[in-house]
Image (cartoon, rainbow, N blue to C red):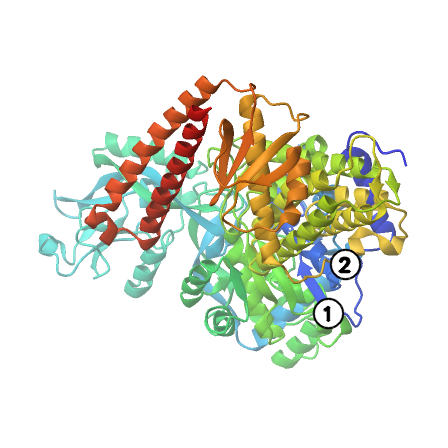
Amino acid sequence: MNIPSKYDPVAIEDKWYAYWLEHKYFHSVPDNREPFTIVIPPPNVTGVLHMGHMLNNTLQDVLIRKARLQGRNACWVPGMDHASIATEAKVVAKLREEGIRKADLTREEFLEHAWEWTHNYGGVILEQLKKLGCSCDWDRTKFTMDEDMSASVIRVFVDLYKKGLIYKGYRMVNWDPEAKTTLSDEEVIYEEKQGQLFYLKYAVEGSSETLTIATTRPETILGDTAICIHPEDERFDHLRGKKAVVPVCNRVIPIIEDEYVDIEFGTGCLKVTPAHDENDWKLGEKHGLETIDIFNEDATLNDYGLHYKGKDRFEVRKEIVKELKEIGALEKVETYNNKVGTSERTKAIIEPRLLDQWFLSMEELVKPALKAVVDTGEVRFFPKKFENIYKVWMENIRDWNISRQLWWGQQIPAYYFGEGYREVVVAESPEEALKEARLKSGNPALKPEDLKQDEDVLDTWFSSWLWPISVFGGILDPDNEEVKYYYPTNDLVTAPDIIFFWVARMIVAGYEFRDARPFENVYFTGLVRDKERRKMSKQLGNSPDALKLIENYGADGVRVGLLLSAPAGNDLLFDESLCQQGKNFANKIWNAFRLVKGWEVKELPQPEAAAVGIQWYGNKLSSTLEEVNDHFSKYRISDALMAIYKLIWDDFCSWFLEIVKPAYQQPIDEKTYASVIGFFEENLKLLHPFMPFLTEEVWQCMSERSPEEALVIASWPESMAVDKEILEEFSFTTEVISGIRTIRKEKNIPQKEALELQQIRVQEVSAKWDSVIEKLGNIKKITSVESAPDGALSFRVKSNEFFIPVTGAVDLEAEVQKIQEELTYTRGFLKSVEKKLSNERFVNNAPEAVVALERKKASDAREKIETLEKSLASLSAS
């Protein structure tokens, strides 16, 4: 077989992905095997592959491929989220470019444009995931706006409404003026920002006196309907029952009293603007104040804005401050830091706004979900630290605002009728709604056109919280074969920033609609950051092109680069050099494969070194397999990869292949070769979840394989008993070989020059390892001696001393000087350690492990001094 000299990922990745798809290795149907199910965190239909997606989906692919190798019925369900806010914004922007305003379209016309956009531009990310090697069951791809998925959402809404858990209420909500929709509390990100505190003077009606209030938002004075003081604040006793005049608009407003006012903040006087602050609204309700909303839906000022009408809120802030100064109503301005709420989607600064909205009551719903994570451990978080974050949020949860002022999404199934459309019914279809409306009104003559459906759509998360259930049809058909087989799913891999948006809500939905957890384990990835610890983003320009990385380093190289530094729950400091490390690893394996396939195989006796090496590597492989399985059980995926990386690079390539490699242009014996191939194949199985393309290529090139023998569906290695004594003896052997190599390097003794090795052994190690030392150290003879021979170079391995006699090849005078310098340094080091150990305060107060380490340093230094002194004596004698 003609094997290319270089590994070319570009040439083989498309080939093997097409092969896997052709043979439907990723497709799953219920059978008698144990299922292993993962549902993808559905990326936005607007999305393109970025580093966070790369990390998240690589981790999922590792888990699903390992489960497939373990004989589980692996099912990874892919899909996309319709992303109401993001997608509608994209469509509106596209229409604007075409000279079309959303306001000029009917809902149906706009949705036609939205679906056209989705079909043309949506789903790009799923094709990109294939480039990464993701082994999703693409036949199961779901979209949250699929007909059955939408029907599931509507059914759940109706069910919760009839249970009394969904209600409509006039509340202060979070308003995104850019997306022109409400947001749930979880979709608001609070950021510390430096602003200003403005001290404004209000005239007291009927007097020359003024009172001063402090505000960060001077533009909202146009909506003020009261001034509030604390009932026990003696400074303002003379103002009780009086009225004040709002500057600029000259509205006369009452001065009220309430304990809500913080006497210590600002001036002790609080302006009350019920339409633009939640606490002010509560005060307004309590004191029967007028509510004046000064903003349009895009946060420009309305008619109440007087001469500022139509201007943006921040533009008005600058201008009104100028006007207040001109009229003498601005007392002073101070720098002030406060938390500002921004939209998680559009980054726009949120406006509190009073609206009639649909809410889901959460207090009772969350109880089983809270218990499952915090009390029973039915759902486990990795890392565990996120359990407490989850607990605090769930215990303080607020009702979920589930309505959005958009057209793209599932339209709320509430139908209004009667005079002023004040009556409402909630039903799964217009036909069902009409029946219920006739029954409720007692009017059988009601016609479809007498009903008007709610204009709002449901929050996108209200569809994705059902994802693990709805992708298997478990809402519409709760007893179907698929949901009973695949649900609950096994693992969820996600970023911690959506623990409340999605993870918690899915757990709530699982217990509410199936009385079971939606998944067993949640693996939280970290955020991908650059070397300077900055979060990767388009704005900063520090996020590399994901597809370009794959093109440059191969998908396997990128996967390794990401995972080598991706501990669960901790941020990943991404450096492109990590991908180069992954590419180098692929080349190392490819070169090892070329080496092995280049050997001529003959029927020959097996060399002793090869037999010993095979015995060692079999145990090393089993030991590493135990370690890898343990890492996987604890979701230490990065550690699992590192263990495999070291096994293949260090143990297999650097030690094992050197031990068994035949002499130059000589054949290898059949028995050894069979073991080499067997171990190589086991290595490929371990590595396949991490580097699927390279491993499949090498596997298929190793020998002729039928489709049933593809690596993607091979068997995960089985654990064998580990002889730890063999591993310890081999470790000793490698130290001896390293000692010989060090002397060769330091004394410029060529590798081809065979040397004699003499030893004073204290630690007994089987003589069978001598064959390995002889081969890798190019040692012609190993003998035991009673004392250090004259004129020999020496080194120590644990308690054993080794000597290499030399004749004229070494400058004895220079060697003596070098040893003396090392001896002087080591004695000084020992003295400093002994001084530290003689300090009772240190010994009594330092951690036990620290003291033990210092004692070991002292012991090692004494041993080294003894060896150096013997070497010095030996060289001096010669």
**Where is residue 602 drawn, in percent x and y?**
88, 42
**Where is residue 506 drawn, in percent x and y?**
58, 64
Q: CA distance from mark 1 to mark 2?
A: 15 Å
| Element type where label 1 sits in the image | loop
Which quadrant is the N terminus positioned in? top right
**Where is residue 524 drawn, in percent x and y?**
54, 54
Whether residue 145 can be seen here = no
Q: Residues within 10 Å of mark 1 (few under 14, many from 20)?
A: some
**Where is residue 231 drawn, in percent x and y?**
15, 61
233 sits to left or right of 125? left
Q: Nearer the viewer, residue 811 or 202?
A: 811
The image shows residue 500, relative to residue 301, as above or below, that is below
Q: Nearer the viewer, residue 508 or 401?
A: 508
The image shows residue 265, relative to residue 789, as above or below, that is below
Residue that mark 1 sits on: 34
Q: Amino acid at mark 1?
A: Glu
- Residue at point 77%, 70% (across, down): 33
Residue that mark 2 sits on: 715
Q: Amino acid at mark 2?
A: Ser
Q: Nearer the viewer, residue 767 or 685?
A: 767
Q: Nearer the viewer, mark 1 or mark 2?
A: 2
Whether residue 190 can be seen here = yes
Marks 1,2: beta carbons within 8 A: no
- Residue at point 77%, 74% (across, down): 481
- Residue at point 53%, 40% (across, down): 785
- Residue at point 83%, 46% (across, down): 605
